Image (spheres, rainbow, N blue to C red):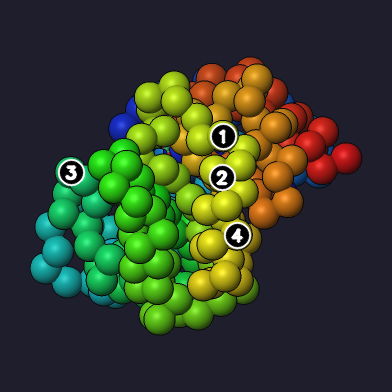
Amino acid sequence: MLIAGNWKMFKTQAETREFCAAFSPPDGVDVVVCPPFTSLAAAVESGLRVFAQNVHWAEDGAYTGEISAAMLQELGVAGSLVGHSERRQYFGESDESVARRAAAALEAGLDVIACVGETLEERERGATELVLRLQTDAVADAVGAHPRLVVAYEPVWAIGTGETATPEIAQDAHAFVKSILDVPVLYGGSVKPDNAAELLSQPAVDGALVGGASLDPDSFAAICRAALAARA
Ligand code: PEP
């Protein structure tokens, strides 16, 4: 069971060290934190498993504002998110660029969490499966069921909104993604200590990608304990 915390554009280096000193997850859960680029080294120093929030496909070059897999590996970073909905929504990330990022990162030896998920408008017009198919196919065509690849199903309407997919919605979406690409699938979207166990006890839910609740060491540790209990 993998529980990953996406810190987005939160936590300086000092705040990262403070978090790490206070964070005490249970044994038996794979825990990852995804700090902003500037706090990666501080998190690695603490001994936590650390992923970046994005990675470029080129080894180096004229790509202002981007970071390569080798640059991350030099810091001791173990993997990266790709295709988070905020990257797709605000920074023009496409299914094609997400697939290129995933392929290059895996090729370089990083682990990858590739994010997919429908907007509220897409769900309401009955396009959820179409969107999930297009997003998942792009990654599947580029890398297949790679052993270091995980998908995160993150319905956009549930991210940072306090609204969570029901366990049934999550289970159905995960089963659908797995029918296209047979890799572990994390659920993301307002996971909190009090809803984590129910979501994580669904058979097709293999872990969680946690945003807001991963910023607090006690809440994030509580979600990790719920994950353990859900699989007991
Ligand atoms: C996310 O950013 O990946 C996320 C799931 O955020 P939140 O848990 O805050 O909804």
Locate ligand 1 by image quadrant: top left
Q: Which mark is residue 166?
A: 1
The secondary element bearing badge 4 is classed as: helix
Which amino acid does the dot numbered 1 rest on? Thr
Which amino acid does the dot numbered 4 rest on? Ala
Q: In this view, does 217 lie above or below 80?
A: above
Say which label, 4 or 1, has the lower sequence index. Answer: 1
The secondary element bearing badge 1 is classed as: loop
Q: Is residue 60 visible?
A: yes
Q: Distance between the residues labelled 3 and 4?
A: 28 Å
Comparing 190 with 31, the one in front is 190
State yes or no: discs 4 and 1 in contact (Cβ < 8 Å): no
Residue carrying label 3: 90
Q: In this view, does 3 lie above or below 212?
A: below
Residue lying at 40% horizontally and 73% vertically, measured from the top left: 137
Which amino acid does the dot numbered 3 rest on? Tyr
Which amino acid does the dot numbered 2 rest on? Ala
Q: How far apart are marks 3 and 2 (CA)?
A: 25 Å
State yes or no: discs 1 and 2 in contact (Cβ < 8 Å): yes
Q: Which mark is residue 175?
A: 4
Residue carrying label 2: 170
Label 2 CA crowd tier, 10 Å (few <14, some 14–19, many 20+): many
Label 1 CA crowd tier, 10 Å (few <14, some 14–19, many 20+): few
The secondary element bearing badge 3 is classed as: helix
- Quadrant hosting residue 167: top right
What x and y, as percent, mark residue 48? 61, 42
State yes or no: discs 1 and 3 in contact (Cβ < 8 Å): no
State yes or no: discs 3 and 4 in contact (Cβ < 8 Å): no
Q: Distance between the residues labelled 1 and 2?
A: 6 Å
Label 3 CA crowd tier, 10 Å (few <14, some 14–19, many 20+): few
Say which label, 1 or 3, has the lower sequence index. Answer: 3
